[in-house]
Image (spheres, rainbow, N blue to C red):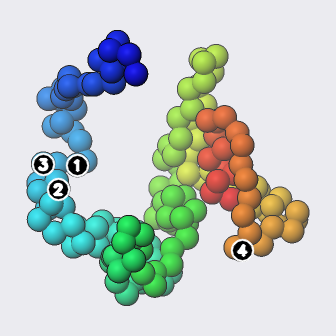
Amino acid sequence: MTDTLANLATETRSFPPPLEFVAQANATAQMYADAEADYEGFWAEQAGRLDWSQPWEQVLDWTDAPFAKWFVGGTLNVAYNCVDRHVDAGLGSRTAIIFEPESGNTETITYNDLKRRVSQAANALTDLGVQAGDRVAIYMPMIPQAVVSMLA
């Protein structure tokens, strides 16, 4: 590596967020302290905010380092946690996605609309013979249809 490239590979600058942003942020300095003091307890608390179809038996299994297993024995439905539970809680009319493409034609998608789109895509995958446990490759740009496809 040349000296020029080696110099470019070192970054020491820091870019702290504006105080207004820090004041309204969800993550606080206390959260970082809690996570450092008891990371398993911290992540158990965070995971408790999700809806689990089968609760976990162990937060972290580190017996086969460096391969960690988190929330051992637990099962959750990611699509349900990302979409359905918000609709079920009466928040279906709230905005789930704001898509701003380069063209400037902003698209706002509510949880109700997202749930409908995900259900349609899931039904299309089922009609193609895709079953639970199958692997499906998705190659799409960062557009709402990519989110819908991943959730389906």
Q: Residue 49 vs residue 19: left or right?
A: right
Q: Residue at image x 25%, y 47%?
A: 26
Figure check: 17 above or below 7: below
Residues tagged 3 and 4 counted as in contact (Cβ below 8 A) = no
The percent position of residue 129, horizontal first and vertical second, equals 86, 68
The residue lying furthest to the top in this view is 4
Q: CA distance from mark 3 to mark 4?
A: 40 Å
- Label 2 secondary element: helix
Residue highlighted by disc 4: 132
Q: Residue at image x 16%, y 53%?
A: 32
Identify residue type, mark 3. Answer: Ala
Q: CA distance from mark 3 to mark 2?
A: 5 Å
- For discs 1 and 4, the disc positioned in front in the rendered view: 4
Q: CA distance from mark 2 to mark 1?
A: 6 Å
The residue lying furthest to the right in this view is 128
* Sequence-first tag of 4 and 2: 2
Q: CA distance from mark 4 to mark 2?
A: 36 Å
Q: Residue 131 vs residue 90: left or right?
A: right
Residue highlighted by disc 3: 29
Q: Residues within 10 Å of mark 3 (few under 14, many from 20)?
A: few
